[in-house]
Image (spheres, rainbow, N blue to C red):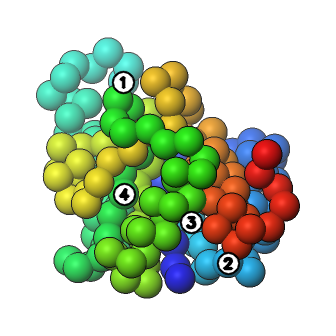
Amino acid sequence: MKIVIHCVGTLKEAYWRAALEEYLKRLTPYAQVSILEVPDVAYKEGAGEAIETKVKEEECAKMLAHIKPGDYVCALDLNQKEYDSVSFSNHLQAMFVRGGSTIHFLIGGSLGLSDEAKKRANESISFSKMTFTHQMSRIILLEQLYRAFKIAYHEPYHK
């Protein structure tokens, strides 16, 4: 099983990088997990909807360029279906059955995902109705993936 997490921007803070490395290490027995970071596009805050749309399109085009036509894609997007941890574990296993050996997760930048990225996704999920930074979203996804595998293999961790 292979999981590719596509993200906009890099983790600058040492504590986020440490958390990322820890969960990548923990996930090693269960799946080959990789992080693919694409550079964020600079823009002025409040530049307008047209500029923000163009920024999202540029950022997401870089992510989508690494995905093959038949690959399974799951977008992380606000106001989409939410799962509890056990349901997500079951759903992750079902994604591998439907999508083959590789699942791609898309995490947009501070402006979110482009319409094209949302259309390319086979499905979209949400962690919460709350908004998280895109840096935090990576760590939450990694932790939930780790928890999902522990649940699937009936190993202690989830309570």
Which mark sits nearer the N-terminus, 1 or 3? 3
Amino acid type assigned to the residue bearing label 1 in the image: Lys
Q: According to the image, label 3 marks what residue?
A: 35
> What element does badge 2 sit on?
loop
Residue 16, label in figure: none
Q: Are marks 1 and 2 in contact (CB under 8 Å)?
A: no
Amino acid type assigned to the residue bearing label 2 in the image: Tyr
Which mark sits nearer the N-terminus, 3 or 4? 3
The image position of residue 139, as x and y in percent, is 66, 48
* Separation of residues labelled 3 and 2 (CA atoms): 16 Å
Q: Residues within 10 Å of mark 2 (few under 14, many from 20)?
A: some
Horizontal relation, residue 124 to residue 127: left or right? left
> What element does badge 3 sit on?
strand
Q: According to the image, label 4 marks what residue?
A: 74
Which mark sits nearer the N-terminus, 4 or 2? 2
Q: Nearer the viewer, mark 4 or mark 1?
A: 4
> What element does badge 4 sit on?
strand
The image position of residue 63, as x and y in percent, is 35, 61
Q: According to the image, label 1 marks what residue?
A: 44
The image position of residue 70, as x and y in percent, is 23, 79
Q: Residue at x 43, y 84 (%)?
A: 101
Residue 55 in view: yes
Q: Residue at x 40, y 68 (%)?
A: 95
Residue 30, label in figure: 2
Which mark sits nearer the N-terminus, 3 or 2? 2
Q: Nearer the viewer, mark 3 or mark 2?
A: 2
